[in-house]
Image: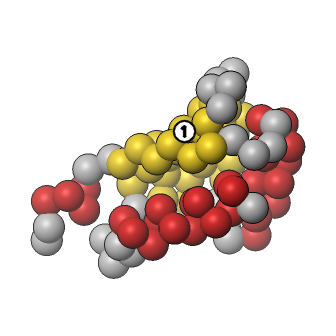
Amino acid sequence: PREDAFMSHTFRIPLTRTKADLLALAEPVLVKQGMNLVRTESGAEFSGQGFAGSLSFTDTETIVEITAKPFIVPWSLVESKLREFLAG
């Protein structure tokens, strides 16, 4: 296995919605995919289907840290899906 497959990755994506709106949109999408979202003071943590990570926010960015993912899923796919959803 490739070494980078097990390292966490952080993605910074321009914030296009309020934190509350983004979390309200993300929760049903994640639940539908069999995942859990737990809101925290700084954003949220999510897990399920082999994925785990967190969302946090600045005034201008959503910061997504992925701490686990299925080996078969490439990081490029993870990033493109995150950007598509969060920029939407």
Q: Is residue 84 above or below residue 21?
A: below
Residue 31 falls in image quadrant: bottom right
Q: Position of residue 87 (x, y in %)?
A: 69, 56
Colour scheme employed for the rendering of this structure: secondary structure
Q: Position of residue 73 (x, y in %)?
A: 39, 74
**For the image shown, how many numbered marks are present on the structure?**
1
Picture residue at 13% right of the left edge, 71% below the top: 1
Query: In the image, 40: left or right of 21?
Result: left
Q: Position of residue 72 (x, y in %)?
A: 33, 78
Residue 35 falls in image quadrant: bottom right
Picture residue at 33% right of the left edge, 47% below the top: 8
Picture residue at 25% right of the left edge, 62% below the top: 5
Helix, strand or loop for disc 1: strand
Q: Which residue is mark 1?
A: 63
Q: Is residue 52 above or below residue 62?
A: below
Query: In the image, 69: left or right of 30?
Result: left
Picture residue at 39% right of the left edge, 69% below the top: 76
State the residue lying farthest toward the bottom.
72
Image quarter where the C terminus lies is bottom right
